[in-house]
Amino acid sequence: MYDTREMRSSLGKAGGMEENTRKRWRSTRKKGRTQKRSKSGGFEFFAIGLTRKMNTKKGRPKKKPTYSEEMIMQELLSAISDAYLTGGNGKGETSSPAVSLRQVANEFDITLMKARKLLITAGVYHTEISEEVNELKAEGKTIEQIMELTGLKRSSVHSYLPYTKSIYNLKELSLYAERCRLYRARKKAVESLRELESDSSIEDRLWDAIRIFAGYRFTTAKSLVFRYTVFGNEIRVDRKKKSIVRSSVNMALKKVIDADGKIRGPKELGVYGASYLYPMFQRFGLIQEETKKF
């Protein structure tokens, strides 16, 4: 940008310039323009785009305008209660737990103590020890006194007490919001598999469920924990080098359909990777299993 004083001086020296040229220069200056001398000696006008709006400071828009700590906490309590009472398979809520506390912890990828504390906050988890700890707290006992009376460690005592306020750690809240969204998506995928029908659509729905459950913490019949990722038409288990192809999944599904879901172990699937497909099919509700609670 040229200095205005230099421009005025050059205009003054140019004796042949008429007064209207000066007026034109002043008017364009007011409009946010300046002048640039061309090689031919004339003047070339161009806009520099400086407007009042550009000089006006604007507040940074919120990344999440509807962001609410309380709303996320309520969604988390609702989702974790649903997982505990229904197993996340859409079969309907019952008065007694449908799955174990460990299964709930695995569902949301949190610790057992965190899962228990959230369920107690939601008012759906009740045991003798949890009732005792909360009664002692209601009587005005301190954490140290409760530890002495129950023999529990400090961390265990806290896990049996409900949250008294929402979680305000933004990173933790964002993580919980994402897990709630993932839980709902997985639940919807499992519900779509409720009706076993021997057609091509069931195979597509099963593969959709497998993709949505990528990263989920599964446990084999021999208590080996594993997770998997999906690449194209292959399942890559973190405990296995060789992938499980989609054709093997479809073969295992056909055997489950033929047996009406009554498969007693991985060997009955008769395909490569059966030890991993078996717990996956159990979680999807395709294989009937006996609920273990602890």
Image (tube, grey):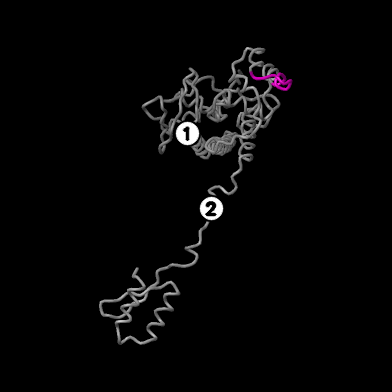
Three-letter amino acid code of the residue under disc 2: Pro
Q: Is residue 2 left or right of residue 183?
A: left
> What is the magenta segment's predominant secondary structure?
helix
Q: What residue would you read off at disc 2?
A: 61
| Quadrant housing residue 169 | top right
Q: Which residues are magenta?
A: 134-143
Specify the label residue 46 is tagged with: none
Residue occupying the point 29% across, 82% down: 13
Identify the element where label 1 is drawn: loop
Residue occupying the point 64% across, 12% down: 148
Which class describes the residues within 10 Å of circle 1: few (<14), some (14-19), or many (20+)? Answer: some
> Could you say where residue 24 lies in the image, as x and y percent from the top left?
40, 81
Q: What residue would you read off at disc 1?
A: 214
Residue 53 vertical position relative to residue 44 in the rendered view, above or below: above
Can you say which quadrant of the picture contains the C terminus? top right
**Residue 199 counted in the magenta span:** no
Q: Is residue 208 left or right of residue 126?
A: left
Residue occupying the point 67% across, 19% down: 142
